[in-house]
Image: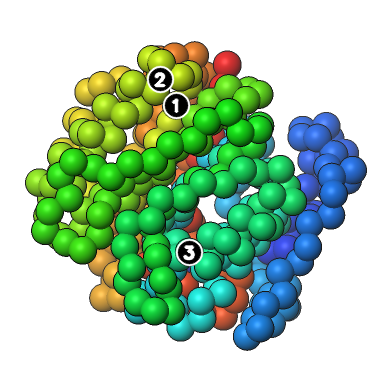
Amino acid sequence: MISFRRRLAIGGAFIVAGALVRLGLFPDRSAEAAAPEPTRAGTAKRSAKISARVPAFLLPANIPNVFDWNMCGGVSNCSSNMDNPWLEAWYSVYFSPTRPRAATFQEICRDQFSNLNAYMQTLGYTGQKYYSNHPNSACHDHGNAVFWKGGNAYSASAAYSNVSGESDVRGWVCGQAQNPAYLACSTHLAANNDNIALSQAGEYRDQLNWKNANRGKTYGGGDFNLTPGQGVNSKFGGAGYVEGAPSALTWHAGNGLQDKLDYVWVPSFNHWCMPYSGGSFENHWGAAQTSDHLQYWAYANLC
């Protein structure tokens, strides 16, 4: 277990949320329709397994409204229980002191998206997906997903033009809210060729640029499979985008290697309020690790 592992607690989240409501720091959601508690075969109730700690960056005045996570959803990847990744994603949204405006995911399997989408709809989210591969019979399709609040004005997805060298047909998916109008996008870039990943990063940035110019405020999250020093910072930072947690480690290997591979890029133009801040942490609602990536929360305010 790595040293920076942190866990949100159901009880701690509710205590903090209640205190913040009483202080008027965020709205009382008691009137919101009660969302179902996930109970799937092979999963126990997690409340007894959750220990308390809410990272400081999850609390006011840095209320996060952007959530990105590579959930490593395939059985062949990180978890032997297909329920675990989408349940952890659901619990993270449902029990967080502040629910994100939008959430982006990578390596989410078809059935996991279907289950998570059903629950997210109870909280007013719209979901869209892009499937990039058919890894095995258990996972079926997997790829990227985006969930957003504020109604469904538009959604789109496409593959990158340069996808050679691996079985994954990498691409992006975006969804646009009606009120307030903004777009959230998710991507997962090539894993076995840095040059191809960097080419895809440039294509992704160009998509974000076009959407910022033609559709409205747009930000892009995802697993870039590139460290900050491998050119991704110049692709985005040089084009007027800022990153919420440029030094946050978002990925770890079994041998203890850690690095930043996941990003949420927000344009410093087009009526986004700055400063932009964020952080990452590892959140396990069950006993078993489900992903080699940490959850990434950030604050990207709309003016």
Decide if residue 264 is in sight here.
no
Identify whether 217 is placed above or below 55. Answer: above
Q: Which of label 3 and label 2 is nearer to you?
A: 3
Task: Give the residue drawn at x 49%, y 14%.
Answer: 271
User: Is label 3 in contact with label 1 (beta carbons under 8 Å)?
Assistant: no
Q: State left or right for residue 72 relative to residue 65.
A: left
> For the residue labelled by badge 3, is the local secondary structure a helix, a strand or a loop?
helix
Q: Which residue is mark 3?
A: 110
Q: Which residue is mark 2?
A: 212
Which quadrant would residue 116 be assigned to in this image? bottom right
> For the residue labelled by badge 2, is the local secondary structure a helix, a strand or a loop?
helix
x then y, percent, for residue 21: 83, 39
Residue at mark 3 to residue at mark 1: CA–CA distance: 25 Å
Q: Residues within 10 Å of mark 3 (few under 14, many from 20)?
A: many
Quarter of the image that includes the N terminus: bottom left
> For the residue labelled by badge 1, is the local secondary structure a helix, a strand or a loop?
strand
Q: Which residue is mark 1?
A: 218
The first of marks 3 and 1 along the sequence is 3
Task: Give the residue drawn at x 85%, y 39%.
Answer: 28
x then y, percent, for residue 138: 43, 79
